[in-house]
Image: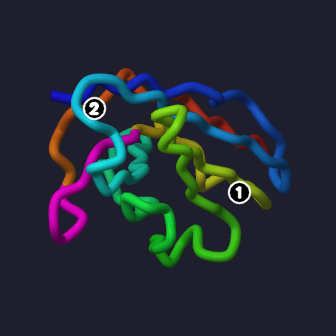
Amino acid sequence: QVQLVESGGGLVQAGGSLRLSCAASGRTFSNYVMGWFRQAPGKEREFVAGVSWSGSRTNYAASVKGRFTISRDNAKNTVYLQMNSLKPEDTAVYYCDALRVGLVPYGYWGQGTQVTVSS
């Protein structure tokens, strides 16, 4: 089992930036591929970004590629999501999770952190 706590969300104007953090505890964090997901009101939760256990490989949803950067610090058991050039359509609750093969989430979800982008 992995416990996850997301933080760093807030209200920002379009074009602004935020940095989300996800602190993990429980099983060995560095063994897991990690990812960020988001869920907007009335929509299904969707994949945003993933990072390999070493941090050397990343992948992104097409909608955020070039604007968001995922990274991790295994010494701190933390994964980050740097979000730049934010758009109103990025408004959602953001969650992190450990990922299985195929970027399938394990389902360890934390409480999430709200990101609201005003136009």
Q: List x then y, in percent, for residue 85.
A: 79, 60
**How packed is label 1: few (under 14 Cα within 10 Å), some, or many (20 or more)?**
many
Amino acid at dot 2: Trp
Disc on the earlier residue, 2 or 1: 1
* Left or right, 93 with reference to 100: right
Q: What's under tag 1, amino acid-wise? A: Lys
106 in magenta: no
Within-10-Å neighbours for mark 2: few <14, some 14–19, many 20+:
some
Give the side of residue 64 with respect to residue 61, left or right.
right
Closer to the camera in the image, 59 or 16: 59
Instruction: Please identify the quarter of the rendering in which residue 20 is found.
Output: top right
Left or right: residue 14 compared with residue 96: right
Vertical relation: 41 (above or below) 112: below
Q: Which mark is residue 87?
A: 1
- Residue 106 location, x and y as percent? 16, 45
Q: Quadrant of residue 47?
A: bottom left
At 48% from the left and 71% from the top, the residue drawn is: 58
Which range is magenta?
Answer: 96-104
- The chosen color scheme is rainbow
CA–CA distance in space, label 2 to label 1 = 24 Å
Where is residue 94? Give x, y as percent.
Answer: 47, 39
| Proximity of marks 2 and 1: CB atoms separated by less than 8 Å | no
Secondary structure at badge 1 equals: loop
Residue 54 higher or lower than 2, as above or below: below
Judged from the image, the secondary structure of the residue bearing numbered disc 2 is loop
Kindly identify which numbered label has been placed on residue 109: 2
Q: Dividing the image into 4 quarters, which one contains the N terminus?
A: top left
Find residue 57 and report its horizontal and vertical position in percent: 46, 74
Q: Residue at x 37, y 58 (%)?
A: 53
